[in-house]
Image: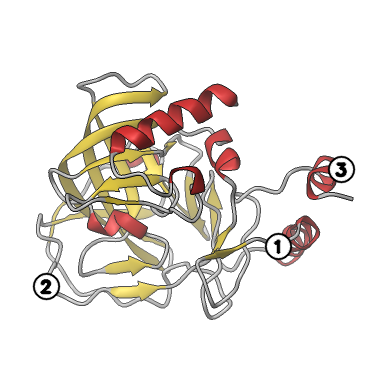
Amino acid sequence: MTREELFRAVGEVREDQIAEHFTRCPWKRYGALAACLVAVLAGVFGWNRLYHTGWDLPFAAEDGGFVDGSDYSAPESAEDSSPSPVYSANVEIGELDGSADHGKTASDASACLVWLDPEEVFSMDTVIFRGVVRNLRYYTVTAGGTELSYTVASVEVTSSLRGDLAKGDICDVLYLGAPGRLSTSIAGDLEDLEIGSEAIFMPFWATEETGWRDGEAYFCYADLAEFYLSEGIRFLFLDTGDGLSFARDVYTDIADAKTLDEVEDYIRDMLTEL
């Protein structure tokens, strides 16, 4: 039985349904049977403390546990403002100052990703646009026994590839991590985003059902942004000023791409084939 036949027989297992653990590289191609087994075991034993909703279910940490923020110690920082949650419950959300402790050492979290082919990536229900970062804001979210740091990038759209955004729109994109507070191994080029950075973004819509729970506490991504990125390796193409940075080992058809124009043309072609 081929991989495709097995997936049709048992239902496709996507990144939002399973998380695999290994220690040598960010992702690895696993057989569908093993992936299904992981999904079954996860359903039997439950995720460790933190339950996610939406596309970015808990991912495996290098120690075999799940990244839930309970083992991190973040430096103290004054919080300027506290956004009022609309969908979140029993959480504290505080905005950090604009510098976000750039000079301090960040807590580090390692995680692994399930392999996805380009066709699988583009078949996900993402909004895809090219844009320039106009502002960066930083937040801490405390829910139950978990405290995590997030960045919200305000991006001016210069080209819309999929979705209802138009040129000139300003949208907010949320992602895990903040300079000097929390760094993850799946952040990829998100950690290199600066005001003025140009990139192609492929985030998910943030709705009242996207977020994570810790006990009775629930943090909803939509309380901070319109969109969210669960990882920056395969869902971001960044122009660093010295060239392009993206997962060339995943997008092998454009492994030699040197401009975002080339990437944009490739994505448009891929979308027409879906």
Mark 1 Cα within 10 Å, few/some/many (few <14, many 20+)? some
In 3D space, how far apart are the residues under numbered discs 1 and 3 (Cα atoms)? 20 Å
Q: Is residue 168 left or right of residue 11?
A: left
Q: Earlier in the sequence, mark 3 or mark 2?
A: 3
Q: Earlier in the sequence, mark 1 or mark 2?
A: 1
Q: Earlier in the sequence, mark 1 or mark 3?
A: 3
* Image depth: mark 1 or mark 3 in front: 3
Local SS, label 2: loop
Q: Are marks 3 and 2 in contact (CB under 8 Å)?
A: no
In 3D space, how far apart are the residues under numbered discs 3 and 2 (Cα atoms)? 52 Å
In 3D space, how far apart are the residues under numbered discs 1 and 2 (Cα atoms)? 39 Å
Q: Are marks 1 and 2 in contact (CB under 8 Å)?
A: no
Residue 200 or 143: which is nearer the viewer? 200
Relative to 151, is 209 above or below? Answer: above
Q: Residue visible at 30% across and 38% down?
A: 260
Give, as a three-letter code, the residue at label 1.
Ala
Q: Is residue 174 left or right of residue 122?
A: left
Relative to 74, is 237 above or below? Answer: above
- In the current view of this chain or complex, which residue is farthest to the bottom? 63
Give, as a three-letter code, the residue at label 3.
Ala
> Residue 201 falls in which quadrant of the image?
top left
Q: Is residue 271 left or right of residue 151?
A: right
Give, as a three-letter code, the residue at label 2.
Gly
> Residue 187 falls in which quadrant of the image?
bottom left
User: Which disc is residue 9 wearing?
Assistant: 3
Q: Which residue is the site of mark 2?
A: 103
Relative to 210, is 34 above or below? Answer: below
Q: Residue visible at 59% across and 47% down?
A: 117
Q: Which residue is the site of mark 1?
A: 42
Q: Is residue 224 visible?
A: no
Q: Are marks 1 and 3 in contact (CB under 8 Å)?
A: no
